[in-house]
Image: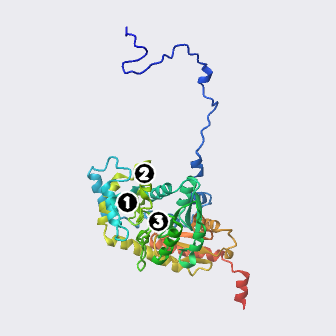
Amino acid sequence: KLPHNNGMNGNGVHHVSVRAHVSVNPAKLKSHRQRWNVRPSEMSKKTLNPIRAIVDGMKLTPNPEKPMIALSIGDPTVFGNLPTDDTVLQAMKEAIDSHKYNGYAPSVGYQKSREAVSNFYSCPEAPLEGKDVILTSGCSQAIELAISVLCNPGDNILVPRPGFSLYKTLAVSMGIQVKHYNLLPEKSWEIDLQHLESLIDDKTACLIVNNPSNPCGSVFTKDHQHKILAVASRNCIPILADEIYGDMVFPGCDFQPLAPLSSDVPILSCGGLAKCWLVPGWRMGWILIHDHNDIFGTGIREGLVKLSQRILGPCTVVQGALESILNDTPPEFYQGTISFLKSNSEICFSELSTVPGLNPVMPTGAMYIMVGIEMEHFPDFQNDVEFTERLVTEQSVFCLPATAFEYPDFFRIVVTVPEEMMIEACIRIREFCARHYRPRSQDSHDLDQ
């Protein structure tokens, strides 16, 4: 029999007997819920991908007599005509064979891999160290982390129109308002700076600048970027620079990253391997923290580290290969990709610019060309969604309606398809337009005179 110890066990912890005089009503032990009621969260209900919403609602039944040509998917690997370089594959093989990259990495990435990125992008005007790099699961996660660290529910962000739909998808799901500033097709999709500045208020937490542009394929001049920075500086707004297509610009055109041009505006620059190295499925992205004047301070940096800990960083094997990928990929690989994209863009622009009712805007980078539709000449269709839907039905060519980018009466063509497929697609688009084009009565009158 144990000695009496006044209710204390050997560790000095007081025990209370639950047997003594406790009267429990069995009914109170039951849950108040009488039936199952499991519902999706508000965040999940507010998460909407505009492209999926539009495409899923389209009646896409190709013409069985014509093979399908999909000019809609922003994945350069789809047709197998743009493989990555052998040095990139070799770096991955060596990383696997080393057996060094099978475990967890720090949530912000291996230090050596972060330094490889900082060394690759550092320049005297915008120096970088390993601590200024956060490695992410693709550029999409980089954008998500950047928005998350800069914005609270109720804030607003400024995003381009037309623009990549993910910005809105992420922001709205977080309770952040999206304000669209206009790009000007007649000025090669430069930002309407006056419109941009008119949208700023005391709840504006971030300006997103996408250069080179998806969906426009445009590349901003240095002069235009200085003007963008002036707006941000005047209004003390930090910038999220989506530069995933950086350096994917045509010969004769220069890509200038935004950060080296900034004297005071702090910038989170988002990039990754996906496009320039043609490996979007490898999910390797990064944030470069540019903060000349210590405006972000430690708070934003610590916030990014904390947010990165929600998902433990990108694939460790790709991190292990990253230094070799960045340093050993030959210049000819990049040049070959860019030459192909420029050639296909020129074919597409040349063919479609002579089609009555269409107005393509010649790109200078990225993988896309935007084509305007003079809807008044196509009375068979109410909008760009119907136009592109019927293009699939009649010609088995699928282009993304630009309503998906908040920009109706245009469609986007992806120029990564093989050349013969691009030529065939343009022939079919011409046939389609010729069948449905109607001159306006005024035009007919002019022709009669």
- Earlier in the chain: of badge 3 and badge 2, it is 3
Amino acid type assigned to the residue bearing label 2 in the image: Ser
Q: Is residue 132 left or right of residue 436?
A: left
Q: Disc number at residue 308?
A: 2
Q: Do callouts 3 and 2 mark residues in contact (Cβ within 8 Å)? A: no
Q: Which residue is mark 1?
A: 132
* SS at badge 1: helix
- Earlier in the chain: of badge 1 and badge 3, it is 1
Residue drawn 35% across the image and 57% down it: 131
Dot 1: few (<14), some (14–19), or many (≥20) neighbours within 10 Å?
Answer: some
| Residue 124 coordinates in the image, percent (x, y) | 34, 71
Q: Do callouts 1 and 3 mark residues in contact (Cβ within 8 Å)? A: no
Residue 250 in view of the camera = yes
* SS at badge 2: helix
Amino acid type assigned to the residue bearing label 3 in the image: Ala
| Residue 252 coordinates in the image, percent (x, y) | 41, 80
> In this rendering, which labeled residue sits more in front, label 1 or label 3?
1
* SS at badge 3: strand
Residue drawn 53% across the image and 79% down it: 351
Q: Disc number at residue 241?
A: 3
Of residue 362 and residue 139, the one placed in the foreground of this image is: 139
Amino acid type assigned to the residue bearing label 1 in the image: Asp
| Residue 36 coordinates in the image, percent (x, y) | 61, 34
Residue drawn 64% across the image and 30% down it: 34
